Amino acid sequence: MQSTPKSQKIPTVAMAVAAGFGVANLYYCQPLLAMIERAFPHSHLAPFIPSATQLGYVFGLILCLPLGDLVDRRRLIVVQFGILALVLVFAAMAPSAPALLLASLVLGAACSVAQQIVPFAAALASDSNRGAIVGKVMSGVLCGILLGRTVAGFIATWFGWRATFWTAVPAMLIAGALMALTLPSRPPVSRISYRAAVASLADLWEEEPVLRRAALTQACLFGSFSVFWTVLSLRLAEPLFHLGADAAGLFALLGVVGIMAAPVSGHIADKHGPSLVVQMGALVTLLSWLAFGLWNSILGMIVGVMVLDFGVQGAIVSNQHKIYALRPEARSRVNTIFMSGIFIGGTVGSAGATTFYHLAGWVPVCLFGAGMASLALVLQLTGKRQPVV
């Protein structure tokens, strides 16, 4: 990979801000779900809008990420932010649940722009500072994940759920302009065709067992994570709590624990190997569901969400530690497989959560979330032990 000369200044802060703006769109609908269901009371599709957003993100990862190796990435990033702005307008004006579901699917696909920015940061960095640069940009992604829910919840409470999407439109235009002004133009790094790049994903999946186990494990963990966040606004709206979208958004601020987990997990992985940290993350995620299911209070929810975020974020850092050492020449495509697996798991988690909640309530939701975390733990404990990388 071509290293960036030391004299070239990397727009790290701008990339972190833009990546956070881009990924935040994935999570707007979660604290708004109860309000959206009330807006479309006769639709059976409204509960699946969070799942549609995550499924769209999977399509975006598979179909758009390989383009980063084939075209000028700056141009691609700017175009995706423009598409995000247009789709947000359509979502804000959606006259029906099917229209909003379609908008959510396309919105999720365009949100893959965040995963274009992160590898671009790695490509711009030199070998000596690549980890630090990528870490700073990833902090922007995590902040977008947290603040997206919080901001969406507050805006929706005071101005309605449609106002959340309207507010995001200028944010996407600003992010696109910021990237156009600060990112350097870079020629394609690969001469293979788009079709060959996409086709090679199947070969990587077949040839790399470490990648398969990491993707499946993280899919289960993120699925468990999505179970909670998808139905949180519905749970808080119950007579037991009688809280609105703003309260659901505030819960996202507790996810700062997840940001704190990243350096801690990295340090443990360096000393004892990433596999141990992933196992610990899966176990911690499972324990969070004991708090959700047995501690029937706001305090129990607070403790549970901090434990949940710590477990899931700790595991993802260590799984990335594993997979990025496998194929340096195919790192973007390895990332495509890993991230696609995560959000397929998230889609399953979201769809299952809404189904179980509407059929039988909170307890089956907790059992479903705990089951996904348990499967992740089993995958790790039954897999072959990998050398420390």
Image (spheres, rainbow, N blue to C red):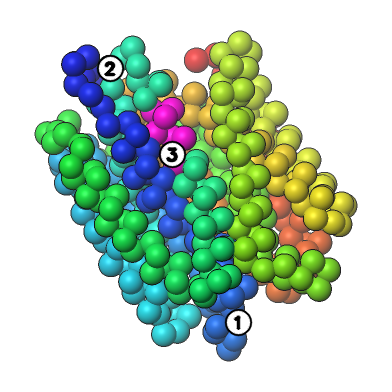
Q: What residue is pinned by disc 3?
A: 140
Q: Estimate the x, y position of residue 284 in percent, counting from the top left.
A: 73, 35
Image quarter of residue 189: top left
Q: What residue is pinned by disc 2?
A: 126
Q: Residue at x 20, y 37 (%)?
A: 183
> What are the residue bounds of the magenta stretch?
134-141
As helix, strand or loop, the secondary structure at mark 2 comes to loop
Nearer to us in this view, 207 or 369:
369
Q: Could you tell me how far apart the alpha carbons at marks 2 and 3 are, in whole angstroms?
A: 20 Å
As helix, strand or loop, the secondary structure at mark 1 comes to helix
Q: Residue at x 46, y 35 (%)?
A: 139
Q: Amino acid at mark 2?
A: Ser
Q: Residues within 10 Å of mark 3 (few under 14, many from 20)?
A: many
Q: Tell me which numbered mark, 3 or 1, is placed earlier along the sequence.
A: 1
Q: Is residue 314 left or right of residue 365?
A: left
Q: Residues within 10 Å of mark 1 (few under 14, many from 20)?
A: few
